[in-house]
Amino acid sequence: MTLTLYNTLTRRQEPFETVEAGKVKMYYCGVTVYDYCHLGHARACIVWDVVRRYLQFIGYEVRYIQNFTDIDDKILNRACVEHSSMEAVADRFIKAYFEDMARLGIKEADEYPRATHTMNGIQRLIHELENKGFAYPADGDVYYAVRQFAEYGKLSGRKLEDMQAGKSERVNVEDPEYQKKKDPFDFALWKAAKPGEPAWESPWGAGRPGWHIECSAMVRDRLGDTIDIHAGGADLIFPHHENEIAQSEAVTGKPLARYWLHNGMVKVDGEKMSKSLGNFITIRELLDRGVDPMAVRLFVLTAQYRTPIDFTDEAIAAATNGWHTIKEGLLFGYQYGKKLGWGVGTGDWGLGTGNIPIPSTQYPVPNPYIERFQEVVNNDFNFPGGLTVLFELAKELRREGNIIVHEGKTETSPDELKRQWQTLVTLAGVLGLEAKIEAEPDKSNGLSDAEIEAKIQQRQEARKAKNFAESDRIRDELQAEGITLIDSRDGTRWHRN
């Protein structure tokens, strides 16, 4: 079961082979922190979170880096409107980012480099590009000479001669920046300071970096010359990732990344999400409506990660129903484990409210569910296919739970049910799907177990005496207390609602 990935660079699916055996260096182009994160960010962060989890699950040691772009025109514009500073705006939305991602169950990256904290690496890289003839200064700016890099366009498949057609209609020849360039395709590595803007000293004068050079420098500083996976949204393929390759590989002479992976975009009711259309939805807005974060994760994972996904009320409702099914399966051990002799309960596991822990029990080998899960997910991170295994397990456990409630026994052996439940919890953990154990009902003002049993005994006596009115009264009284009675040939069982 070899893991194969679709590589944007080669346009084909390839076996996954890392630079260093057993280890993965992974970089995700993170967010520009000028506003709250939206559904597009949610999809990307969930996808790459699960990719990282899966790689760890199949045995890789993963070093996962995600950057913050904290110097940008949009950040500066917001700071100006709010009469604040770039740093204050960036800090506020970085804090908001972590709050939103925690609600979605996103594991934190190993490191979050910031562009403003990487100035030495940025300037060093620009200096090397200049020395190698790939960059030139122009009145305080520094530009990358695109035509000097023979492989420019290899990621996006764009050719300069094709892009040249009609370009004169899209540029303003009176623009001072355009006039500084030797070629219209050249892009800024360093921008001269403008009045009132934050600036850093450099050999080319006070200024700030261009967007593309930031990621090249952060990748190199944190992970080295060549990494295994460079990830991001499909909207970053050109020009951002194309320019990263040109910058980094011109200096090192080595591939920047072995595999370029890109997630598809999010639409809302079939339309591109945008503030102008009024369909712009932030993560916190969605979750504050009462949508379960796990339903959001499930919604994202039901689509192949490279394809566009359409957010609709119907889609999130379907994901919510799907999550309820999986959640029932995840809670199976907590609800029925003690009855099945597993020794599972709040007393035995020390569980209160919170996430169900992944069982540490070693599974019998082979485990057909885990084998099927890996076989399908190894096909270019086919998480929708992996979910079918989870739903199969969850539905089987739900069926057995209903049998326990209504018949007091199971059709499957307790050991097999335990294995199925442990497998479900483990695989759900790989996808970041975690059920919360609800707090025990407050019995301080309700009936104790002994009181319930006494009421049931009174009802049994009333039934023997054919006093059915009294029997019904006791049943109704218990029902009002949230206690459901189930009569069978083997006697009467009860459970709290």
Image (cartoon, rainbow, N blue to C red):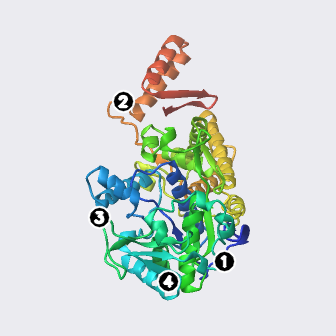
Amino acid at the residue labelled 3: Pro
Question: Closest to the observer: 104 or 197?
Answer: 197
Name the residue beneath numbered marker 1. 17
Residue 88: image quadrant is bottom left
Q: In this view, does 175 lie above or below 466?
A: below
Q: How far apart are marks 4 and 1 (CA)?
A: 30 Å
Q: Which of marks 2 and 3 is in front?
A: 3
What is the number of the mark on residue 446? Answer: 2
Query: Relative to 383, does residue 463 appear above or below in the rendering?
Result: above
Measure the C-alpha gap from mark 2 to mark 1. Answer: 60 Å
* In the displayed structure image, the side of residue 326 where residue 32 appears, left or right: left
Give the residue number, with chain letter if any, for mark 4: 129
Q: Residue furthest front?
A: 174
Percent across and percent down for residue 141 are 41, 74
Q: Residues within 10 Å of mark 2 (few under 14, many from 20)?
A: few
For disc 3, the marked residue is: 195
Q: Comparing marks 4 and 1, which lies closer to the viewer?
A: 4
Q: Which amino acid does label 2 sit on?
A: Gly
Three-letter code, disc 4:
Leu
Disc 2 + disc 4, Cβ < 8 Å: no
